[in-house]
Image (cartoon, coloured by chain):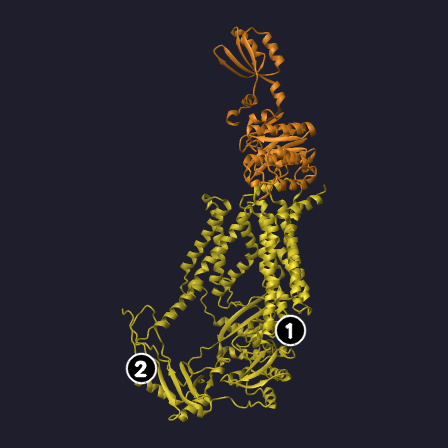
Chain colours: A orange, B yellow
Amino acid sequence: MIEIQGLSKRFDDFYAINGISATIEEGHVFGLVGTNGAGKSTLLRMIAGVLKPTDGQVTVDGRQVYEAPEVKKDIFYISDEQYYFANSTPEDMKNYYKGMYEKFDESRFNDLLGKFGLGTNRRINTFSKGMKKQLSVILGVCANTKYLLCDETFDGLDPVMRQAVKKIFIAELEDRAMTPIIASHNLRELEDICDHVGLLHQGGILFSKDLDEMKLGIHRLQCVFGSDEDKDSFLSGLNIMSHEERGSLHTVTVRGTREELEEALSKTHTVFAEVLPLSLEEIFISETEVVGYDIKNIIA
Amino acid sequence: MTSRTLSLNLFKGECKRRLWLYALTLVVFIALQPGALLMDIDRWLMWGIRPAMMIANIKGTVAISYIGILFMILAVIYATVCYGYIFSRSRVDMYHSLPMNRNELFVVNYLSGLLPFMAIELMVSLLQMCVVLIKGLGGHGIGNVIFSTYIYSVFLFMLAYSITILALSLCGNPVIGLMLSGAVMLGYEFTEMIISWYSNFCFQTHSYISSEDYPLWKLVLSPSSFENRLGNTIGDTPVRFMVLIAVTVIYTLLAAFLYRIRPSESAGKAVCYKILQPIIRMPLVVIAALSGGIYLVFVSGDVMTAGWYWMLFAFAGILTHVVAEIVLQLDFKKAIRHWQQLIISLAVAAVIACFFLYDIGGYDRYIPKDNKVSSAAIALSDIDMDISSFEFTGRGAGEDIEYIDRTAYILREMKSENNTAIRQLASLGVASIDPERSVFKRIEKQRRQEMTYDGVYYSQKISSESSEDNRKLSYTIRYDLTNGRTVYRTYAASLSEAYAPAEAIYDSAEYKEASYQIDEMIGKGLFDKVTLTDSFYDEVFKLSGDDIDTFLTELDKDMKSMTLKRIVDEYPIYQVTGIMKDSEMMGYYNDMLYGYYIYPDYTNTIAFLKSRGANVDTVQRLAPDRIDHVEITDYSRANDPVILYEDIDAKASQQFVEPVKVMYNEDEDKAIIKEINDIAVYDHFCYVNSIFKPYEENLDINIFYQTDNGFLNSVYVRIPKGKLPEKVRDDIEKAYEEGDYANNGEIYATSTIID
């Protein structure tokens, strides 16, 4: 488990991260979302032990990360601009990381390399951006560390490769309870892989929630009420997050379980009522509007 | 996998990636060391140099002195390659996310630069040894020299390596890192140079002799001069190694510490810590302002004015501040952001400058109190100027002799506790300086005087009476103060006033002991032969073998009993020349005895020479029957102005007058020729201690004579002041009246602008 308590990081006169607290459970895929400059990379670099926190602490399995080689053995960090040695090949990088990570799986590396169609002895500086990203993911997965930090790793991958990588992650999750932490500014990308999401904005964490819990706890209802009295009695009994009215059609976002919503509906006379599924983006928008942020300006 | 295994794996990987650097180093070193040695040995063998000389040459070649700078440059390159990753964010992410801590990373990178260098240099040293052995020159301590040079070179490399890492760790940008590295290695040296420029330019009594007592703490501030300075002060001793090791350890630990605390996010910034910016910028502005101000001195010192100085001062300071600001902030728009720091820097520089320019601290007037002086020394610069001072070092290429500045040597060797005469000379010196403190006003005064001279050619008619005595005696004084400091001052005082204390000093045994090194040459077998030459540069006698040492012993006795009065009254009769062994083979002439003369009352020396058959009784002069004619050219009234003026702004026409020539032929003027010949001091010995020998001025006297081969040759002579025969004076006057000009009788006139 990764625990972040009151974590802050200051660069000169500004705070890139300011008082963040969060918990990342093992065996879950944690998505870190936010715009450019939100502090995603900074947070990941602190978890990886690259940056020293200004305040607060980040612990991995109860131990501080910074300058702790024993802790860092369990972490592999894929940077947004992954570095490869000049004129090196995937074989060279494999040998390098094999020397650094005790559990590096060489055979799996060669296997994945083949599946992705990357030449073992081809110079990496001839790879495209997407191919370099693929290589970095393969190296990270084959390092067999407990935690895999991915900074905007899915950016630059084509949709097919993105799906392939997701499958690999899922397989690793199932096989050895690997815990990926994926930072991205693209919410839609994270939706189908992450089970826990944190939203970063201007150095602070707006919220960090389990995705299913989020989805189960918020619903959207479109309905037409029989009368105004029906409308008032229905709305007054619920935790309304947002309410939009177009003619007689009401679109209401309600916090609560589906059962609670259906029970409320059964007590009210409605001409038409339908519970609609909410996307992650819509959930985010609703959640953040409550706190006063116009999320549409934050996420892509 | 233990951390040691990880470190080893990383070390192997890093070394593998730097093979190109090691290969390049090996190639260069092989060429410069065993390759060059092989070529040198072949050349010496071809010349037929004797083995002992060969051994000395080899030792000099394998010694580090001339190649030390290469090791330091290489160290900078290695440090940049091994630690350059800290400037790239992506590389920092890769290295610092590895399961290693900073200490382990530091050690791995440090060793991946140091160990290969050590291996390469060891290989090269062994190759050098092989070259020597193959050529049949093994033994004689060459192996020891190669080995000690190897150890020394490793630590010298480490020193520069650690300093560069230290500098790189403080910066986020390799260019600034390398500049900071250069500043650490050379900054102190450069600052000392600035101070030296200012002292030399502004202070009238500044001595070029700097203290040879180089405190060890200075070595920490001036690593680049480490090898040279330390070698000069304490020579090849174990202390030298220990000091180098200690300084290297200090810098290495400091580098490790700074690397460890360096924030990873510094990659790409100018400097890691904001506080460094003023620390770098402000001293830079101070030094730049001081350098800019004094720049004009090098271009044309005599046009330096206060206006020019302060203008260049301000320009250099401001420009440096702006450039530094742009580089450190990485933003043109912030060029004068810290203008307050600029003002402070310029103010500090101005205070420093004023200290020199206006002698605020009283440098020129400083004479330490008697109770503050533990000992003193003085070098009378105008006496025996031609004599060289030297040291036997065992390190020099060839003769193991290092020539050193004579004044510095005397000051070092002499320690006088009886300071009365020295203090007298110090007081005289202070009284003789220009009372004007401002260097600009002194320059202006001098410029006016020169222009005045240029506009006014004072008539210096020859006279039987001595003109006002303008001769000045120069001397340098060293004070060893009770607080451990050493102070030097150079003065020039009127000879007539300084003579008495100078005589007391020169006549003392301690001065002679410091001044003459004949005794050090005895018994060393330095010379192939020693010759005596006369005033015509003809060799009149030669000594060799054991006679040389005996001769030197007698000469030493006579020189140690010499007095200043005898130097004033007498002229030398012979010059001593010592041809060192293998000089001719080496293709150059090396004479350690240059500047030593024999005077008429060197009784011991002359007695010994006579015992060996030399005829050394008389002063060598031209035989009168060989003289063909004498030509005397008088320049005393050349450029005599029609109008005499002192104001340089006043202008007048001038008529230039040619020098006149008077000739005496052997046929008609035998008597006067003999008279001139009897009193003339011949070219060769005219200039020996000439400060004490006033001559008739502006007379060019050449005696033409028949050589043994029947050719006509001439020798330049001078006549002591006041001894010019009356007939010659009269003939010169007549020549002016009759217009017997030297240059074919042509007279030319010119005029300047007339107001």
Tell me what residue is drawn at x 37 percent, y 73 percent: B453
Position in image of residue B674 (x %, y %)? 43, 92
Q: Which residue is mark 2?
A: B745
Position in image of residue B85 (x %, y %)? 59, 45
- Please state if B136 lies on the left or on the right of B43 as rendered: right
Tell me what residue is drawn at x 61 percent, y 10 percent: A263
Specify the amino acid type for callout 2: Gly
Camera sees residue B580: yes
Q: Callout 1: 10 Å neighbours few (<14), some, many (20+)?
A: few
On what subunit does the disc labeled 1 rest? B
- Please state if B690 lies on the left or on the right of B447 as rendered: right
Asked if both marks, 2 and 1, belong to the same chain, the answer given is yes
- Of residues B422 and B745, the one nearer the viewer is B745
Q: Give the answer, above or below, for where B659 lies relative to A90.
A: below
User: Looking at the image, is mark 2 or mark 1 earlier in the sequence?
Assistant: 1
- Of residues A153 and A292, the one nearer the viewer is A153
Which quarter of the image is occupied by the C terminus of chain B?
A: bottom left
Camera sees residue B223: no
Specify the amino acid type for callout 1: Pro
Nearer the observer: mark 2 or 1; the answer is: 1
Q: Secondary structure at mark 1?
A: helix
Residue B422: image quadrant is: bottom right
Q: Which residue is mark 1?
A: B51
Which quarter of the image is occupied by the N terminus of chain B?
A: top right
